[in-house]
Amino acid sequence: MRKKIIAGNWKMNMTPSEAVKLVETLKPLVNNPDVDVVFCVPAIDLIPVAEAAKGSNIQVGAENMYFEDKGAYTGEISPLMLTDAGIKYVVLGHSERREYFAETNETVNKKMLKAFEHGITPIMCCGESLQQREQGVTMDFIRQQVKVGFLGVTADQAKTAVIAYEPIWAIGTGKTATTEQAQEVCKDIRACIAEIYDAATAEAIRIQYGGSVNAETAPDLFAQPDIDGGLVGGASLKPDFGKIVNYK
Ligand code: PGA
């Protein structure tokens, strides 16, 4: 049985002092030992959030990372900085990074390899636009994202990875994919992992759904056989996140 993983994606929200207050508020609400709970937060919030989360079940993740250890890359954050700060997760290839910051499947792949090299668990995002869904190329597009994203990743590494399926049309729009749509794509992503690797890897890898998840939609979504939790944006900044983590 795969353990559910429910991650908040704070995006570009919360100053360091606001972040600490939010962790204090959420700490008692997200205490569910059956679920891995991860707060993915802006770089400047990582250390105060990790500090504030001490002694709780909250694990901390970054929202991005560069694919070199160090050097002349002004403005970037390296995997060494993350591991030294005790950060165990990183979101890679979020659609907002692909759209606004020119991330490609190739740069996501370099970051994936780098994250594994340093023992950081990647939460690799994929997902189609509304146009792609309407044109019937959803799975062609997602397969490409997954196949290139995992190039050179070993089966043992892939088993520990997290994939977040986030249809772009459902992000921040209040328009959640139906449970059936979300399950169908997550199942196909698992089949794609089985093709790249083997059945055991597909069985082990955790696949989240993301896109306007809230306390009402979470129970049905997370009950699906191929949905192992969620990547939650807007609702992760509110006490409602406690309800999502305790969806059962
Ligand atoms: P949302 O964001 O829950 O606000 O739609 C999800 C995400 O972008 O990870």
Image (tube, rainbow, N blue to C red):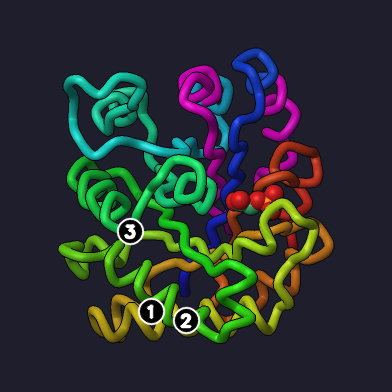
Give the quadrant of residue 57. Answer: top right
- Residues at marks 1 and 2, CA–CA distance in whole angstroms: 19 Å
| Element on which disc 3 rests | helix
Give the quadrant of residue 6. Answer: bottom right
Which residue is identified by label 2?
A: 139
Q: Earlier in the sequence, mark 1 or mark 2?
A: 2
- The percent coordinates of residue 8 (x first, y second) are 61, 45
Q: Which residues are magenta?
A: 21-49
Residue at (71% x, 78% y) in the render: 179
Which residue is identified by label 3?
A: 105
Judge from the rendering whether residue 225 lies leftward or rightward of residue 126; answer left or right: right
| Element on which disc 2 rests | helix
Q: Quadrant of the C terminus?
A: bottom right
Q: Which mark is residue 156?
A: none
For the residue pair 62 and 177, the one nearer the viewer reads as: 177
For the residue pair 134 and 26, the one nearer the viewer reads as: 134
What amino acid does circle 3 point to?
Asn
Q: Earlier in the sequence, mark 1 or mark 3?
A: 3
